[in-house]
Amino acid sequence: MLVIARRRDEVIWIGPADAPIGCITIVNIKRDGVRIGLDFPRSIEIHKHISAEALDSFTKIQSEGKKDAKINTTDKGARG
């Protein structure tokens, strides 16, 4: 794991220097967390870790036949 320090509004480019595939921007820093912006092509899948409780609830709803169920998370980003 690479660990680096960044300040608000700083950007981390991902991929080759001459043709990066996307970037991560530090949007906001608060005492209890950091908000990041991910700017990648739609073809790149982005997944976030969810709690076991949320996953259990999602699995239960799907097993009840609700195939269009969505996992409820506190993040409000466009891509979950």
Image (cartoon, rainbow, N blue to C red):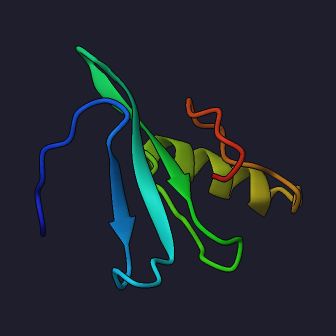
Front in this rendered view, residue 68 or 17: 17
Q: Looking at this rendering, what residue extends furthest in the top direction? A: 31
Front in this rendered view, residue 35 or 8: 8
Q: Is residue 64 above or below residue 44?
A: above
Q: In the shown orientation, is residue 26 left or right of residue 62?
A: left
Front in this rendered view, residue 39 or 67: 39
Residue 39 position, x and y percent, is 57, 57
Residue occupying the point 69% across, 80% down: 43
Q: Is residue 32 above or below residue 35?
A: above
Q: Is residue 69 above or below residue 14?
A: above
Q: Looking at this rendering, what residue extends furthest in the front direction? A: 18
Q: Is residue 49 visible?
A: no
Q: Is residue 37 above or below residue 35?
A: below
Q: Is residue 5 visible?
A: yes
Residue 7 position, x and y percent, is 23, 33
Q: In the shown orientation, is residue 5 left or right of residue 20?
A: left
Q: In the shown orientation, is residue 71 left or right of residue 9?
A: right
Displayed quadrant of residue 15: bottom left
Displayed quadrant of residue 57: top right
Count every numbered label the image shows and give the total: 0
Residue 37 position, x and y percent, is 50, 44
Residue occupying the point 88% across, 55% down: 66
Residue occupying the point 12% across, 69% down: 1
Residue occupying the point 58% across, 66% down: 40
Residue 24 position, x and y percent, is 42, 54
